[in-house]
Amino acid sequence: MENPVLQSIEPVIKNSEHVRINEDKIREFAESFSQKGHWMNNSPFDINVLTDEEKLAFSFIFNSISFSYWGNPKWTIDYKGEKVDGAYGLIASIGKVLEKEKKILDFEYLSDISAIDLELILKGNIMIPLIEHRMNILHEIGSVLRKKFDGSPVNLLEKSGRDALKLVSLLINEFPSFNDCTFYNGYHVFFNKRAQLFASDVYQLFNGEGYGNLTNSDKLTACADYKLPKILRELSILEYSRELEFIIDNKRQIPRDCMQETEIRANTVKAIELIKEGLKERIPGIKSIHVNDCVWLLSQNKSPDDKPYHLVRTTAY
């Protein structure tokens, strides 16, 4: 079984007008590359205090509503005396609830979670963007999981046959909110960012054992978001047209599914694949998900010289 993402992005790579990959810079980065482990290892809430079943449910819920954190000001929460934002902020928000009670892992509760409850769970300095979309997605996953999988992500995993690619396919077919695709010059292009990240997280949370014993994990691609291309651009691996540079550097929002967004995402996936290929001899067994996490973790090192990321208001990432 092959990952449809890779074949689908090729027409975008071939015809990109605003984004190109500098393969010389890929070789430079590959030479200095060092693995940094699973990105969740650095999260403020220790997921390992949960049972295996709870960890699986946690990851499923998190990946269902992990998207679009940016804004001015940026959504931020207080957790154990520290300010946390973005994906780690969402993890900490869920973790806060779990330190008091476990009902947030109950999919019957999520299938009918109220706006007031969700706003309290995600309470920060401002309202998190797309709060209503997040609530609707929780209703969807709670309802579908109850009706088709007896309310347990374990059954979702079992129905996939413990195959990472089949798990992704199951998610996008059974849960419409996980479907992440677009069209580019008439070509159907797939990214499936959140579905692939869930499969990757399950594999890595369990170190490839138990629930994490998934075949085809080596065929998962990079999870095309807004952090990866930001770092790849800073590394000069991704090069943008002057027009796109102007838009991004001036923090102007671009529409979802526009040509520029699709080219950024497709070239991000391709660049991570090329980095992985360049590392295979030096690091046997390296997977795209390992490179993905390494590059994403680089985005957590804040600097005044950081370049902005592209701004798209979307539930895809």
Image: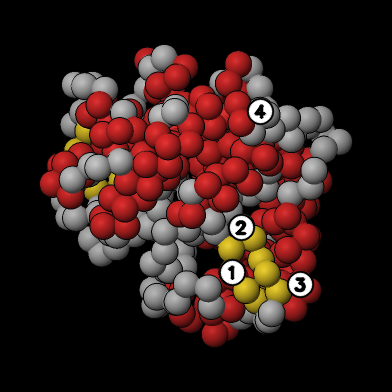
**Identity of the amino acid at label 3?**
Pro
**Identity of the amino acid at label 2?**
Phe
Is label 3 or label 1 in front?
Answer: 1
Is label 2 or label 4 in front?
Answer: 4
Tag 4: Cα neighbours inside 10 Å, few (<14), some, or many (≥20)? Answer: many
Q: Are marks 4 and 3 in contact (CB under 8 Å)?
A: no
Number of the label disc, if any, that sits on residue 162:
4
Give me the residue at 70% from left, 56% from top: 5
SS for dot 1? strand
Give me the residue at 25% from left, 42% from top: 112
Front residue of 98/53: it is 53
- Inter-mark Cα distance, 2 to 3: 14 Å
Query: According to the image, label 3 marks what residue?
Result: 11
Residue 80 placed where, x, y %? 21, 28
- Inter-mark Cα distance, 2 to 4: 21 Å
Query: According to the image, label 2 marks what residue?
Result: 191
**Residue at the right extreme of this rendering:** 281
| N-term mark: 3 or 1 | 3
